[in-house]
Image (tube, grey):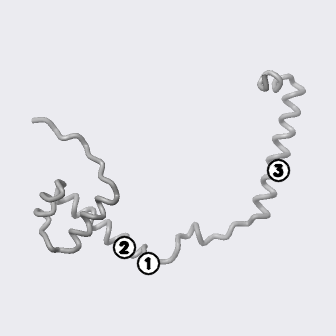
Amino acid sequence: MSKRPRRNHSPAFKAKVALAAVGGEKTLAELAQQFDVHPNQITQWRSQLLDGAAGVFGSPSPAAAEPVDVKTLHAKIGELTLANDFLEIALDKAGLLASAKR
């Protein structure tokens, strides 16, 4: 008996199956046969859909809510530019940069 190769389902397919399971028009066994997936997998996708549904209408993610301090970022860019310039001069004096540029 040979095993079926592992399948990777697209997020759209998973959503379609989970929505059909939430709809309740068919049993898990009927959905499993229709979509050719295991009933436990359908239950798992349905749970993920229901758990994540509140996030659709919730507040924005914390990463998007944090303001970006542009002055601090510009200062950091200046520091890194100075460091790069210094290292370039030092490597050039040591004779190591000339071989890298060729």
Instruction: Name the image quarter holding residue 46.
Output: bottom left
Q: Which of the labelled discs sits on residue 53, or is there none?
A: 2
Where does the C terminus fall, quadrant-wise?
Answer: top right
Q: Which residue is mark 1?
A: 57
Tag 2 secondary structure: helix
Q: Amino acid at mark 3?
A: Glu
Measuring 15% from the left and 63% from the top, which residue is drawn there? 31
Q: Position of residue 47 (x, y in %)?
A: 28, 67
**N-term mark: 3 or 2:** 2
Q: Which of the labelled discs sits on residue 79, or is there none?
A: 3
Q: Position of residue 63 (x, y in %)?
A: 58, 66
Marks 3 and 2, Cα distance to the nearest angstrom?
44 Å
In the image: residue 85, left or right of residue 25: right
Instruction: Name the image quarter holding residue 91.
Output: top right
Is 22 above or below relative to 100?
Answer: below
Question: For this rendering, which residue is in front, 48 or 15?
Answer: 15
Marks 2 and 1, Cα distance to the nearest angstrom?
8 Å
Marks 3 and 1, Cα distance to the nearest angstrom?
42 Å
- Pointer 1 local density, CA inside 10 Å: few below 14, some 14–19, many at least 20: few
